[in-house]
Amino acid sequence: MGYLVFARKWRPQTFDQVLAQDHVTVTLRNAIKSGRVGHSYLFTGPRGVGKTTTARILAKALNCSRGPTPDPCGECEACVGITRGNHLDVMEIDGASNRGIDEIRELRQKVRYASSSGRYKVYIIDEVHMLTNEAFNALLKILEEPPEQVVFIFATTAPRKVPATILSRCQRFDFRRIPSAVMADYISGEASREGIEIGRRALLMVCRAGGGSMRDALSIMDQLVSYAGGPIDADVVSELLGLVGADLLEAIVSAMLRGDSAGALESVAGAMSRGHDSVELLDSLVAYLRNLMLVAAGAPSGLEGVSDAEADAFRRLAELTDELTVLNLIRILGAASREARRDSLPRVALETAVMTASRLAQALAIDSLPPSGAGASKPPAETPASEEAAEEPPETEADADETSPEEERPPVQEVGSAGETDEERETREREEEKNRQVFGLFDAIPRDRG
Ligand SMILES: [Zn+2]
């Protein structure tokens, strides 16, 4: 038996196996069950999310010897033929390479003949938006008077390029990107059946690199299996894909947040010496900080494709900082990424940004130092006495009594909404002060390094 790439070997063979497209598969199953199969379908969505796979399953569902059935057997002659791509009544046409009028005219001739098996003739046209206008017109004539027992399934990544006259004659299904975690679970199951060892973190890196496309993720798996020749871990994936590792990103971000610009620049230099690219590193840092921002803002459900270990790292880093600081670091590094793309000195843009970000984080951290000990409810920067108290934790009750202005304050704050308003005002004032510092720092940075 010949070698099959994973994208073919692990292709879903039933509606239930199609990932993350329940809104499509449930509707199609119901249509088949109730005998209401349309003449033409349009499957839209990004590449590699299951459009052609679903089209083939629909073809099997219609032509299975036990069918039409929502659960094709996968064993009869029709099912096997469709899976192998050599069934006489199921035609797959690549719209990109058969885009002219002649091909569609030929199709128009063939469409009239009944299917060889007496069941459905199914035409799957991939990348249908590539057809020429003449070809679309010829296709439209077929769709205006569709022959019995013929089903067209058009797939496209660019539905806006399909003429409205065609769109209006199709049932449209929008396929979605597959979430990394869903993809990782699927690949993990298939891989373990094959005896391929791959760690969870490595898997998530593969899925992220696939960008929501199962086909792309599986083609990376093909490369990895031949490259690794054994268990696949995160380092192997980083090596093959040239990805910036999470450990490196954590080291740089952690140093920046601590205001340790020397440490951050050291890590950057290390990455550069290992062959990383400045723009790639900047983009990875921005993506990393975006996740950190979600955690710092208390909205971690938006994290995608992050392992448990990485999620722990984000929680640790979030304790060092707050979302406003992270937001500003994203701005600085994002601007540097745009600059680095245009600039002849991308490394300077990277290093300047890391330096600026470290200084900024330091400035903001001084401002937001948590008040120590029992002083949690005292207003900051009120009197010299409170500053003293912030520097050294109150050791005894007697000590605290000496700072009598503070002792009088808490009862005032505890008076219901009045106390809360005070707190809110403090928070707002602190934010405003931070903003002043941030903008002051931005002003101090020369914008035009040229
Ligand atoms: Zn069958």
Image (cartoon, rainbow, N blue to C red):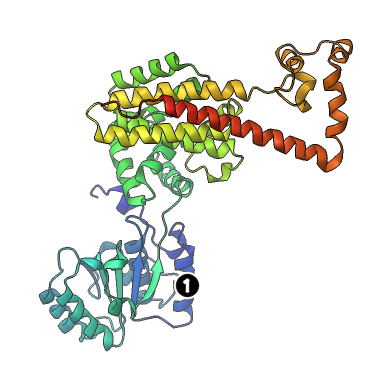
Instruction: Using residue 22 as the reference point, say whether residue 281 is left or right of it.
Output: left
**Residue 67 appears at what percent x and percent y?**
40, 77
Q: Nearer the viewer, residue 249 or 204?
A: 249
At label 1, counting other C-alpha atoms closer than 10 Å, the crowd grade (few under 14, some 14-19, many 20 or more) is: few
- For the point 45% across and 46% down, the residue is 180
- Above or below: residue 194 compared with residue 438: below
Q: Is mark 1 within 8 Å of ligand 1?
A: no
Q: In this view, which residue lies farthest toward the left?
A: 102
Q: Nearer the viewer, residue 336 or 144?
A: 336
**Residue 428 appears at what percent x and percent y?**
65, 36
The answer to whether any part of residue 146 appears in the image is no
- For the point 27% across and 49% down, the residue is 4
- For the point 33% across and 41% down, the residue is 221
**Residue 53 appears at what percent x and percent y?**
34, 62
The answer to whether any part of residue 278 appears in the image is yes
For residue 164, what is the image quadrant? bottom left
- Above or below: residue 251 compared with residue 76: above
Counting the numbered discs, the total is: 1
Please name the residue that numbered disc 1 is placed on. Answer: 27
Question: Which image quarter holds the C terminus?
Answer: top left
The quadrant where ligand 1 appears is bottom left
